[in-house]
Image (tube, coloured by chain):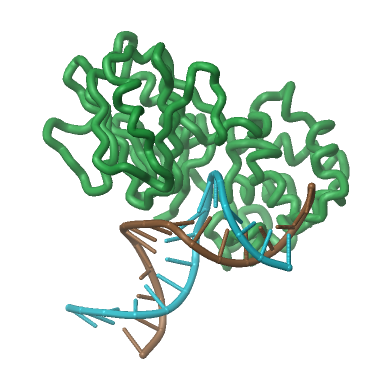
Chain colours: A green, B brown, C cyan
Amino acid sequence: MLVAMPELPEVETVRAGLKRLIGREAVIERVELTRPDLRRRIPISLAKRLSGQRITGIRRRAKYLIIDTPSASLLCHLGMTGSWRLAAPGEELAHDHCYLHLADGRRLAFRDPRRFGMLDLLEPDGHHPSLDGLGPEPLDERAFTVDYLAATCRKRKAPIKALIMDQRVVVGIGNIYAQESLFRAGIRPRVAAGSMSRPRLTRLIEEARAVLRDAIAAGGSTISDFRHAGGGSGYFQHRFQVYDRKGQPCARCATKLVGGVVAGRGTTWCPRCQK
DNA sequence: CGAATCACCTGATCGC
DNA sequence: TGCGATCAGGTGATTC
């Protein structure tokens, strides 16, 4: 089965799903933690700070989900395998790490088998070590500009793929959407960032936005243990053109796709379409 | 400083 | 059938 990890479109889909699920008047009656840590320790004050609080909003920043309350916010990263779902009464799955018991009797479950995710408190001032220093949102046309990207790439010898996956440069793009963006833009992943021309960077920005928008519109991509908020049925399986397709024919020219390790991750590209 | 490498973790897959 | 090795990847720490 084709797999896709939670990158910007998937997190955005979870955000939208949770928001619809929660509705207008949701109150967190109680927070139940089933373990003290994920990849990092979960603060013991988290349950106390969020219990009894009304949910005032659900946001996304980069690949982070933020559930706001007047007291503090819940900052959540899905890591590789994190998911939120509406748990059926009495349902407890392996790797359920946190339950938000709502005042209306419903229960939201955070599950993350691999525990690469994160649950933390975000103070009302909005500052957090994981958020400070993040780059612009790729869909923010005022912040993620070709001027900005060209200045960032200048004199950098790292592969362009490494740059666009670097959350300090631009957020939300992981191994999958980096590969898809580069394919669509006709750029080889190993090209040195500093050697990219302005027109090519412009094209890359456009294609990255396009593929992210497509995936959001399609409801995010998915993996076998990834559930959309609400656990709905029939979630869409996004069609990738290069990710995990090494050895298969290019969708555009039918040349056999090649692969290697770029920026420390498995990477596939078309040797003919991408220069 | 930039760039590369490793650690974290479980489940899926592969070879024998 | 079973079992060990390998791989996947976001982030953050470490190394060069």
Q: Quadrant of residue A68?
A: top left
Residue A40 lies left or right of residue A184; in this view the side is: left
Tell me what residue is drawn at x 55 percent, y 36 percent: A130
Relative image position of residue A160 (x, y in whole percent): 74, 50
Tell me what residue is drawn at x 43 percent, y 39 percent: A118
Q: Quadrant of residue A219?
A: top left
Answer yes or no: is residue A31 visible.
yes
| Residue A128, placed above or below residue A197 | above
Tell me what residue is drawn at x 56 percent, y 54 percent: A243
Answer yes or no: is residue A267 visible.
no
Name the outermost residue toward the left.
A90
| Residue B11, placed above or below residue A60 | below
- The quarter of the image holding the N terminus of chain A is bottom left
Relative image position of residue A38 (x, y in whole percent): 37, 45
Please name whichever residue, A137 or A207, is drawn nearer the observer in this view of the structure. Answer: A137
- The quarter of the image holding the C terminus of chain A is bottom right
Residue A85 lies left or right of residue A126; in this view the side is: left
Relative image position of residue A111 (x, y in whole percent): 31, 41
| Residue A240, placed above or below residue A209 | below
Relative image position of residue A104 (x, y in whole percent): 19, 15
Tell me what residue is drawn at x 52 percent, y 36 percent: A63
Please name whichever residue, A189 or A263, is drawn nearer the observer in this view of the structure. Answer: A263
Please name whichever residue, A138 or A237, is drawn nearer the observer in this view of the structure. Answer: A138
- Image label count: 0
